[in-house]
Image (spheres, grey):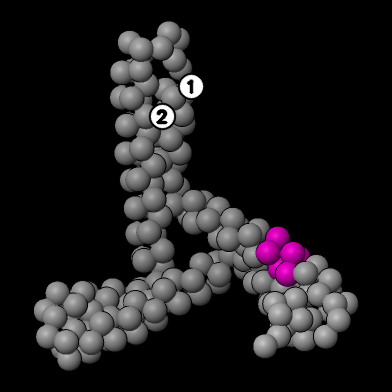
Amino acid sequence: MASVPEGFAKKWWGLLLRGILAIAFGLTAFLLPDVTLLTLALLYGAYALVDGLVSTWFGRISRSWWLVLFGLLGIGVGIYTLYLPINTATAMLYMIAAWILFRGVIEIVTAIRLRTEIRNEWSLLIAGLFSIGMALLLFARPGAGALAVVWLVGAYALVSGVLLIKLALRVRRLPQ
C-alpha cells in the first residue's frame, strides 16, 4: 500500500486540476456574481430534490413516516428552488439577516446584564448594535448582501485554488 505522500506524488495532477477549477470558480464569482448566485441556488435545488427523493424512497422501504415527510419536504423545496432559484437565494439571505438581528438583540441584552458585573462594559453593546445595523442593511439591500456572500465564496475559492496548486507543485517533486 502506498504512503500518503507517495499517493499524492503519483496523482499530483489531480491537486493541480482541483486548484485550477477552484481559481476558475473564484474568478467567475467575481466577474459574474449573478450567474454564480443563480448556479449555487440551482445546485442546492437539485440536491434538495434528489435528497428528498432518496429520503422518501428510503422512508417507504423502512416504514419511517417521518423520513417520508422529510423527503416530501425536500422534494417540495427542490422543485420550488429549481423553479424560482432567485427567490430561494433571497430567502436564505433573509434567514441570515434574521439570525444576525436576533444575535444583536441578545448581545445588547447580555451587555446590559453584564454592566452589573463589569464596569464600563461597552464592547458587547457595540457588537450588538453593529449586528443589528448589519441585519437592517441586509433586509434593506438583499442584493448587496447576496453579492457579498458570492464574493466571500469566490475569495475562498481563489485562495484555496492557489494553495492546492502550490501543494501539487510541491508533491510532484516527491519520489514516486
Cα separation, mark 2 vs mark 1, equals 9 Å
User: Is 171 situated above or below 60?
Assistant: above
Camera-side residue of 163 and 3: 3
Q: Is residue 139 visible?
A: no
Q: Is residue 141 above or below residue 78?
A: above
- Up/down of 144 relative to 54, above or below: above
For the point 73% across and 69% down, which residue is it?
Answer: 164
Residue placed most toward the observer, 86 or 153: 153
Magenta includes 163?
Answer: yes
Q: Position of residue 81 (x, y in %)?
A: 35, 74
The location of residue 107, given as percent across then percent down, is 37, 29
Q: Is residue 120 magenta?
A: no
Residue stretch in magenta:
159-164
Neighbour class for label 2 at 10 Å: few (<14), some, many (≥20)? Answer: many
Please state if 20 lies on the left or on the right of 105 as rendered.
right
- The residue at the point 31 percent across, 18 percent down is 113
Is 159 located above or below residue 78 in the figure?
Answer: above
> In the rendered structure, which amino acid carries the disc numbered 1?
Ser
Q: Quadrant of the C terminus?
A: bottom right
Residue displayed at 41% across by 29% down:
128
* Position of residue 68 in the picture relative to residue 150 (left or right): left
| Image mark for residue 123 | 1
Residue type at tag 2: Gly
